[in-house]
Image (tube, coloured by chain):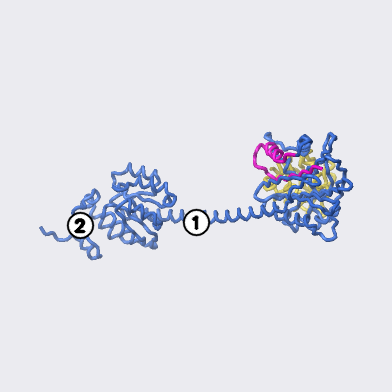
Chain colours: A yellow, B blue
Amino acid sequence: MELQVIHKDETYTHIALLGKLDVGGVGEIENKFLGFTAAGKKNAIVDISGVTFLGSMGLRIILDAAKTLNREKKKLILLTPQPLVHEVLEASGIGEIVSIQHDLAAAVALAQA
Amino acid sequence: MDTAPDPASKRSRAAGRRPIDELFGAGEATTASKRVRSSVGRQLFEFVLEQPSGKQAPSSGRLLIVDHDQLSRDILSRNLKREGYAVEMETDGTRAMARLGEGIFDLVLWEVALPTLNGFDLLTKIKKDSALQHIPIVLLSEQAETENVIRCIEAGAEDYLSKPFNPALLKARIRGCMERKTLRDQEQRLLATIKTHQERLTGELNEASAYLRSLFPAPVSEPFSIDWRFIPSSELGGDSFGYRWIDDDHFALYLLDVCGHGVGAALLSVAALNVLRSGAMQGTDFRNPEAVLSAVNRAFPMEEHNNRYFTLWYGVYQRSTRKIAYGSGGHPPALLIIPGEAAPKKLAAKGMMIGGMPGSRYVAQSCEVPPGSRLFLFCDGAYELTAPDGRTYTFDEFADILAGLPANIPVDLDRLVAQIRTLNDSKPLDDDLSLITIQF
């Protein structure tokens, strides 16, 4: 599992995840992920187009980050999930507190709003 | 001819010891004793007898010296006793073997060429005996026995000492052997402790697993047949499920899947399951999936449950109307296969994972269940499997497998589980697998 920082300014952070977000993958990036999202206290775009699998522990860290940002009135935006990952996100109901976007411009506009 | 005693003999007598000449009986002229009769040998042995024990702390441990040469035995014994060891001696190999069985010796010094049992044969014997194989053996050898010594070292001897003994070397080697023995003993005690703890933990996990399984209801055959399989990925799974009649007309069916697996997941799973199976949520109508999901979501906020959430599918079949009402807290859809319909019906409903967010809304759905319908309820572990080419199977692929099962005979769940294992390339499952089927 890999985490790349794409962009960072005062308004928002844009990171990308690559690999399988299963128990092992979560273990590799959890602290870093929460550091760039939950701890940042600003909007966060997470490009998950490179995530090939999203398991329950992966959902947990996304939920963790989204809830923390929500308390700060900030947003977590998931960008371009693959169809299978999108199916998992839909089934989980996590769309209630995260925004799922398929277009970078729309995601950035949301993050800058 | 009388000969005046030499200075070394005088020192020995002054120290309360017999001089070398007295240690050698007339008939005891062994190879070793012949050698020490030379002036160099005599000096060396006197040196050994007079060596101070040094400033190191006294050693402890019980040693057995097995040597048919009396002089060697005496020299070793004195030196080692001076070092603080308890020393016992034997001259016969068979008797010495019997003594080893007492289990009281920390180290054995064995003459490599002992006539009654040589070093190599001894090592071959004790390495086969689990009660003796841990005892370190130090071989006592003549200089000429190098090849024998090598053979014995290869067979598992701890070390060797050449005669005549160099006191410093003797002391260092025995001390080294004893230290290694102490470390090995500590390691063995630690391993035994770990094993004991491991066995206790395994026993407790098995007991917990048996308890979890005891909460699952037995298969049912009337008025419809229900069967299930549960295969946890570790000793304790995070999945649990149940079904029960709420009243004469309403039958509840549910499956929950706590994120992660292991003890933490199982504890939460059991807590939530007990609430659902006992109907212990005051003021909640268990015939109403929305009400149940909302109440469980209120009861199990993840912040108060080790930051774990769970998914839950909860359905209520009403016998009088042949309808099933269902709701989901982030759980994959159940699958209803209706006779005569080409595609299976996904019983999906929107709703957040349980415990994920306070105040989440759950919207129930419902559908008719015609006679002969077959319902499958399962967790994501049933299809989130890795194919040999590395890709992950999809829900729809698994749905196709279920839809393709013969409709005219009962579902063979064991065969289905075997098929799931094959999909997973016959590797151990990464996630718990729970699968319930109802034949209406």
Name which residue type carries label 1: Arg
In-image side of B39 versus B130 (left or right): left
Q: Position of residue A47 (x, y in %)?
A: 77, 42
Q: Quadrant of the C terminus of chain B?
A: top right
Give the residue drawn at x 24%, y 55%: B43
Which quadrant of the structure image shows residue A81?
top right
In the visual, does B28 lie left or right of B325?
Answer: left
Label 1 neighbourhood size at 10 Å, few (<14), some (14-19), many (20+)? few
Residue found 26% across the figure and 55% down from its top: B70
A32 and B323: which is toward the camera: B323
Determine the secondary structure under disc 2: helix
Q: Position of residue B270 (x, y in %)?
A: 72, 55
* Badge 2 amino acid: Asp
Q: Residue B16, position in %: x, y?
A: 25, 65
Which residue matches tag 1? B189
Determine the chain carrying the residue at label 1: B
